[in-house]
């Protein structure tokens, strides 16, 4: 496969990959693999890359052989970009994407307020980029093709699974005769309509929102700034809400809320959509790239782990799109699971470590569902009194700060905070900095030669493993074997000239943070001892939770 | 219990009257709008989610009592 050039993935928004017969299909018995990932969307591709970079062979199956029908997910978070940096694709995403930090909320024809999601300097990545999902997928596929550990097989559709004691047997349909594979672990990243979820017999319950939303990508040149604009009751779409996002290639994403009783077949006709959008833009100098109609749902699986089958991304949880919590939370699933599965496959941690994937990420899913449900309810009040409350908030927002803060046009994705058995509780007093269970903040640094780099770069350079971040106190800090090491200040340490890292980590001489491979804080110490660090490591490895607690 | 249910106004009648007068001349829908805004303004002034929850529980208890009396 060739590099996915922008021209190929451009206006037609489509990339076609060929089916290729694999030698596994010639075997009479099922070929044995360690990990099979089902679904080559952003989550499955990222997860496969992560695991391959950790040295594992991965089979990645997808039932289609093309990407790029519509822009779909478009907002990728700072957290997602930092993950993609570790996978070697972050810069390409940022180079192509449009960067934004500011959102504006309008009511009627006037602006209610604006918010900046990243108001401070000194971060490598912005709050968000907008990038069509097909570009993200195309760049991830290019990265996959650089990794011989990954066998990516298009038009391989899983039609049955059998769970055995220590492995799973998959039956796979292809353009040739069906074949079978066995795997110790199957990671199901096959989307909201996951067929693997049905095969394990798991439910997927939650809330369906009655209002329908029209999503259109239009191509036009427009003077709007690169910001997220959200309208309640705009003059061009009375009584409903609207959302505008810029994407690369002069493509604009427009979401329009429709009434619950409208006819989808009628509403998605371009001649029906065009006047609505023309009213919004004040002109009709645009062309449609994609039109889709949605009813949003918020739901999740009760358990993300079913025997040897582990669910990640939309297959495990689904949210409404107001908050960019779909693809971004799926990528957080991938980074959470990859290092744990790596340790279990290497027998460095017990299989029970994987259970903490469910613990941490199902709680994150609950949070994402809660946030996106609240936003969707605010946009589409379900009773007359809720509509009255919303009207009161919107009206109060014109003259009060608290009213502005109550207006919910979507609360945008930020990394979840994990309440997890892998964390070691603080034993000392802290006045800031990320506590255990929070993700690491970035900070601008310089190396001894004076070259600028970011803390997230220094962390990634340690090999995406457990890493001790230490603020030097003059003497060299002691660190256990097999753990990465980033030192700020002191002899040979990185230079925190502007003090951002010290402030963001509430650091004094000797302050140390134990970072997990996914960049989450496992423990932190004012005055670390080797024994305390090793105890925290054991807990974070999932080997000695009971003994230590 | 964080919610204060002691009498906090020096002249409780003034407070009651102030609210009553605010509603004078309003129809039911306008009164509901006014109350809704008032609830949000006062809730924010209190600024304590536990107090708010206790207040909601106390208010809701009236409705349960009322519905039981109807049976």
Image: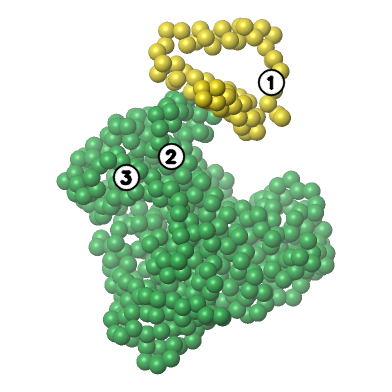
Q: Which residue is mark 3?
A: A212
Name the residue furthest left: A271
Q: Are marks 2 and 1 on the same chain?
A: no
Q: Are marks 1 and 3 on the same chain?
A: no
Q: Quadrant of the C terminus of chain A?
A: bottom right
Q: Residue at x 40, y 76 (%)?
A: A160
Compare residues A41 and A86 and report the one nearer the observer. A41
Asked if marks 1 and 3 touch (Cβ < 8 Å), the reply is no
In the picture, the disc for residue A377 is 2
Q: Position of residue A387 (x, y in %)?
A: 41, 30
Is residue A143 found left or right of A521 in the rendered image? left
Q: Are marks 3 and 2 on the same chain?
A: yes
Q: CA distance from mark 2 to mark 1?
A: 32 Å
Identify the colour of chain A in the image.
green
Q: Quadrant of the N terminus of chain A?
A: bottom left
Q: Residue at x 42, y 70 (%)?
A: A199
Compare residues A115 and A184 and report the one nearer the observer. A184
- Regarding residue B8, the answer to whether it shows in the image is yes
Query: Measured along the vertical axis of the image, is residue A99 above or below residue A257?
Result: below
Q: Residue at x 66, y 7 (%)?
A: B11
Is residue B71 found left or right of A541 in the rendered image? left
């Amino acid at each position: 496969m060739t590099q996915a050039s922008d021209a190929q993935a451009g206006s037609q928004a489509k990339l076609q990959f060929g089916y290729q017969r694999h030698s596994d299909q010639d075997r009479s018995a099922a070929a044995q693999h360690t990990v099979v990932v089902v679904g080559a969307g952003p989550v499955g591709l990222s997860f496969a890359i992560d695991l391959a970079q950790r040295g594992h062979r991965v089979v990645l199956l997808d039932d289609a052989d093309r990407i790029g029908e519509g822009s779909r997910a478009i907002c990728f978070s700072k957290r997602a970009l930092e993950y993609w940096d570790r996978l070697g694709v972050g810069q390409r995403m940022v180079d192509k994407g449009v960067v934004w930090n500011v959102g504006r909320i309008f009511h009627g024809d006037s602006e209610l307020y604006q918010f900046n999601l990243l108001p401070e300097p000194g971060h490598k990545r912005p709050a968000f980029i907008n990038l069509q999902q097909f570009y993200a997928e195309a760049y991830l596929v290019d990265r996959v093709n650089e990794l011989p550990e990954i066998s990516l097989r298009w038009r391989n559709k899983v039609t049955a699974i059998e769970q055995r004691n220590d492995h799973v047997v998959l039956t796979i349909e292809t353009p040739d005769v069906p074949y079978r594979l066995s795997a110790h672990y199957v990671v199901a990243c096959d989307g909201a309509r996951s067929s693997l979820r049905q095969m394990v017999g798991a439910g997927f319950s939650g809330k369906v929102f009655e209002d329908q939303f029209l999503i259109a990508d239009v191509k036009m040149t427009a003077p709007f700034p690169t910001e997220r604009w959200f309208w309640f009751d705009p003059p061009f779409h009375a009584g409903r809400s609207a959302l505008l996002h810029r994407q690369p290639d002069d493509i604009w994403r427009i979401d329009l809320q429709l009434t619950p009783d409208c006819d989808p077949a009628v509403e998605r006709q371009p001649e029906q959509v065009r006047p609505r959008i023309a009213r919004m833009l004040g002109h009709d100098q645009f062309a449609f790239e994609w039109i889709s109609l949605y009813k949003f749902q918020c739901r999740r699986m009760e358990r993300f782990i079913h025997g040897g089958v582990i669910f990640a991304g939309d297959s495990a949880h689904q949210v409404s799109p107001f908050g960019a919590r779909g693809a971004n939370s799926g990528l957080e699933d991938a980074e959470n699971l990859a290092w744990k599965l790596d340790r279990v496959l290497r027998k460095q941690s017990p299989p029970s470590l994987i259970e903490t994937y469910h613990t941490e990420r199902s709680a994150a899913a609950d949070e994402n569902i809660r946030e996106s449900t609240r936003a969707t309810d605010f946009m589409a009040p379900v009773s007359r009194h809720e509509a009255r409350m919303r009207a009161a908030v919107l009206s109060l927002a014109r003259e009060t700060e608290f009213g502005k803060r109550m207006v919910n046009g979507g609360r945008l994705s930020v990394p979840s905070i994990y309440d997890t058995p892998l964390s070691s509780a603080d034993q000392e007093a802290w006045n800031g900095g990320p506590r255990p269970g929070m993700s690491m903040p970035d900070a601008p640094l310089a190396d001894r030669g004076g070259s600028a780099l970011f803390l997230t770069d220094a962390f990634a350079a340690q090999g995406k493993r457990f890493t001790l971040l230490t603020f030097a106190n003059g003497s060299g800090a002691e660190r256990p074997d097999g753990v990465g090491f980033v030192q700020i200040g002191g002899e040979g340490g990185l230079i925190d000239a502007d003090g951002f890292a010290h402030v963001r980590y509430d650091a004094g001489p000797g302050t140390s943070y134990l970072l997990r491979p996914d960049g989450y804080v496992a423990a932190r110490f004012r005055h670390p001892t080797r024994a305390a660090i090793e105890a925290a490591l054991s807990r974070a490895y999932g080997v000695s939770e009971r003994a230590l607690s | 219990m964080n919610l204060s249910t002691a009498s906090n106004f020096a002249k409780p009648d003034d407070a009651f009257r102030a609210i009553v007068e605010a509603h004078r001349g309003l129809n039911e829908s306008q009164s509901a709008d006014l109350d809704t805004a008032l609830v949000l303004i006062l809730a924010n002034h209190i600024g304590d989610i536990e107090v708010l929850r206790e207040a909601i529980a106390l208010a809701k208890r009236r409705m349960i009592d009322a519905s039981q009396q109807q049976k």
